[in-house]
Amino acid sequence: MADPSSYRPKPGEIPDSPGVYRFRDEHRRVIYVGKAKSLRQRLANYFQDLAGLHPRTRSMVTTAASVEWTVVSTEVEALQLEYSWIKEYDPRFNVKYRDDKSYPYLAVTMNEEYPRVQVMRGHKKKGVRYFGPYAHAWAIRDTVDLLLRVFPVRTCSAGVFKNAARTGRPCLLGYIGKCSAPCVDRVSAEEHRELADEFCDFMTGRTNTYIRRLEKQMAEAADEMEYERAARLRDDIGALKKAMEKNAVVLADATDADLIAVAEDELEAAVQIFHVRGGRVRGQRGWVTDKVEEITTGALVEHALQQLYGEETGDAVPKEVLVPALPDPVEPVQEWLAGRRGSGVSLRIPQRGDKKALMETVERNAQQALVLHKTKRASDLTTRSRALEEIADALDLDSAPLRIECYDISHLQGDDVVASMVVFEDGLARKSEYRRFQIKGFAGQDDVRSMHEVITRRFRRYLAEKEKTGEWTDGENAETPDHAETLEIDRNGEIVEAGPTEDDGRPKKFAYPPQLVVVDGGAPQVAAARRALDELGIDDIAVCGLAKRLEEVWLPGDDDPVVLPRTSEGLYLLQRVRDEAHRFAITYQRAKRSKRFRSSPLDDVPGLGDTRKQALLKHFGSLKKLRSATIDQICEVPGIGRKTAETIAVALARSAPAAPAVNTATGEIMEEEPGTMGSSGEPVAAGAPDERRGQET
C-alpha cells in the first residue's frame, strides 16, 4: 500500500487547464483514467486526508504509485481522449458498465448480393443494418416469421443458398411463400434487394405506409372478385399488425430517441436504456457498474453515453437522448454526440407528457435491475472475500492472494504436450490474461519436467519485463520521466502531435506477478514449480498444488498435505481455478491434435498459405480434381502464378495415392468426397485415430 504523499506532484507543477490524467500502480499499469476542466483543482482532491476520501477512492490512491497527465485544448478533446484511454488500458478502478449478456440484434446483411435477415450478436459489421437490441433471440424470430409473409427476404445460410442454387430446388420457406427464392431465380437480385429495403423501412417505423398500401390492394382485389388474393392480403395485413403489437406505441410516430435511467446506491449503479424508433420501443438493454469514487448521477450518465455511443456513428446516435440528470458541463458532451451523429443531438431531461411517463418506466426497470443484481451478488462478494481469507490462512500467507495463477499440463499419451496458465483476480477469472504454452524442452510424457519448463519460461519473461521497465535500475541513475505532455487532437479525436511518451500502460503478457501459483498435481509438480522459482531467484511468490484424487492441497517441502474442509469456500475457489486451467489446457491440446490430423499435400508447398489453399479447393471442388488439373488450369485460380502452380503440381504428384481405397465389405471403390474438408478448407486425412482412444490429461 503506497502513501499518496510519496508521489504527489510539487505545488505549481500541475497546470490549470483542461486535460486527462492517469494513475499507475507500481508495475506501471494504468489503474484509473479521468478528465478535468482544471487538472490542478481536480488532482488536488485526490491528495487530501485519506480519512476524508470515499473508500474506493482511498483504495485507488493507495494502490497507485504515480500520476501523470496530458494537457488538451478543450473539454471535448478531454472527453474524446478519456474514452480512448479507458478502452485502450481497461483501468480496474474506472466506471465500467458490465453488460449482463450479449444482446441479440435483428440484422439485414445489405453488404451481400442477396441480403439475408438473421439474428446477430457481438461487434457490428460494416454494411449490415441492425435493429434492436432485443431482450431475447426468440422475440426476433417471432417478429421475422410474421414479416416474411409480406417481405419474403432470404434467411438461409450461405451453404443452404448455394446448395439450392446447385440443385435448382428452393428450401421449405421458398415452397410455403416465406422466401422469394432468389437462389432459383424466382426474383432477380434487384427485386430481392427492394424487398430487403422495404423490410428495413418497416423496421425503422414506416409501418402505416405499407399497411395502407396492402389495404388498398385488398380492396381492389375484392372489387375485382379475386377473393383468394384478397384473403392473402388480409392475412398479410394481420401479420404486420401483430408484429407491430409486439412493440407498443409509446410516443409520436416520428420520435427517434434513447431514454437512459439510473438507479444507484453508495457502491453500485444500474443503467437501463430504452431505444425508441418511430415512436415504438425497438430495444432495451441494461448495465451495472461499481462506483469507484464519489460520483454524481450526471457523471454516471456521461460514462453511460460514452459506453453507448463511443463506437457508433450516423443514425445509430438518435436525434434525442433523454436522461435523468445532465453531465456538468453538458456542452462538451452534446458537442461530442453531435460529432458522432453528424448533426445536432438534443440531450435533455423530460419534464412532462408521454416522454416523462416513459422515463418513469425506464427508471422502474433500472431499480429492479439493481435490486436483482445486488441479490445475486451479495453472497458472491462475501464468499469470494471469505474464500481468499481461508486460502491465506491455510497456506500461511501474509495477505489474501488477490492474483492467483494456475498451471496445468495436457497431452494425449505423450503427444502434443501443452500447458495452460489461467489468472484469477479478486476471485474472478480474468480471461484476457490467460496464456498457453507448447512444451519445447523435450519430447514425450513427463508432467514434472513440463511443469518446471512452463514455470521457468513464464517467470523468466516476468523478470525480463521488470528489467525492461527499469524496476531493477539503481535509484540514483534512474531517469525520471516528465509528468506532463502536451497533446494536439483534431476534431475527429485523432492524435496529431504528441510529446514524449512513457510506457503505454497496456497489459503485458507476463508483466505482473501473482501472490499465489497453483499447479494441477501433487507433491512432485509442486516441487518442480518451487525449484523453477528458486532457480530464478524469486522467493516472494507462494506455491501450492491441488491433487485431483482427494482434493488435497500440497505445499513445497511438506510431507503431508493441507486438507481443507469439503465445505470450505477456499477449497471451492481453488477447485474452480484448477478446473478452469484444465479446461483451457484440454481445449488447446485438442486444437493442436485436430490440426495435426488435418493434413494436406498442399502443406508442403512453400509460401502457400491458408487463403490460397482454400481458393484452390473452392475452385476445383476437391483434392482429387486439383491433382488431375494441368498447370495452366491451376494458374486460372486468382493469386496463383505459374511458378507456384508448377510447385503445387510437383507436390501433388509426389503424394498421389498408389491405388484407390476399396470398401472390403462391398467391394466398392471409395471416391474422394468433394466436401471432405477440414475447418481450414483442407481435406481431412483418412484414418484419423478415434478421439476416445487414449487418455487426455
Image: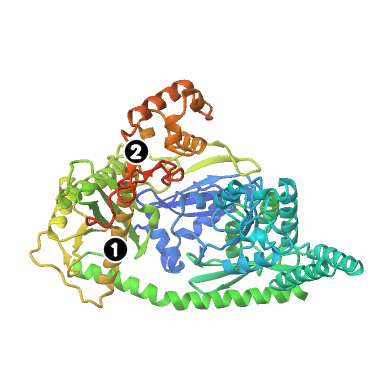
Q: Which quadrant would the C terminus be assigned to in this image?
A: bottom left
Residue at numbered disc 2: 660
Asked whether 46 or 563 is in front, the reply is 563
Residue depicted at 87% across the width and 66% down the height: 221
Q: Residue furthest top?
A: 643
Question: Mark 1 falls on what kind of element?
Answer: helix
In the image, residue 172 above or below residue 493? below
Residue 131 is at least partly visible in this image:
no
Residue depicted at 40% across the width and 49% down the height: 507
In the image, residue 297 above or below residue 411? below
Q: Which mark is residue 665?
A: none
Residue depicted at 69% across the width and 49% down the height: 339
Q: Which mark is residue 579?
A: 1
Residue 211 is situated, as x and y percent measured from the top left of the image, at: 81, 66
Residue 93 is situated, as x and y percent measured from the top left of the image, at: 45, 60
**What's under tag 2, amino acid-wise?**
Pro
Question: Mark 2 falls on what kind of element?
Answer: loop
Q: Of callouts 2 and 1, which one flags the residue occurring earlier in the amino acid sequence? A: 1
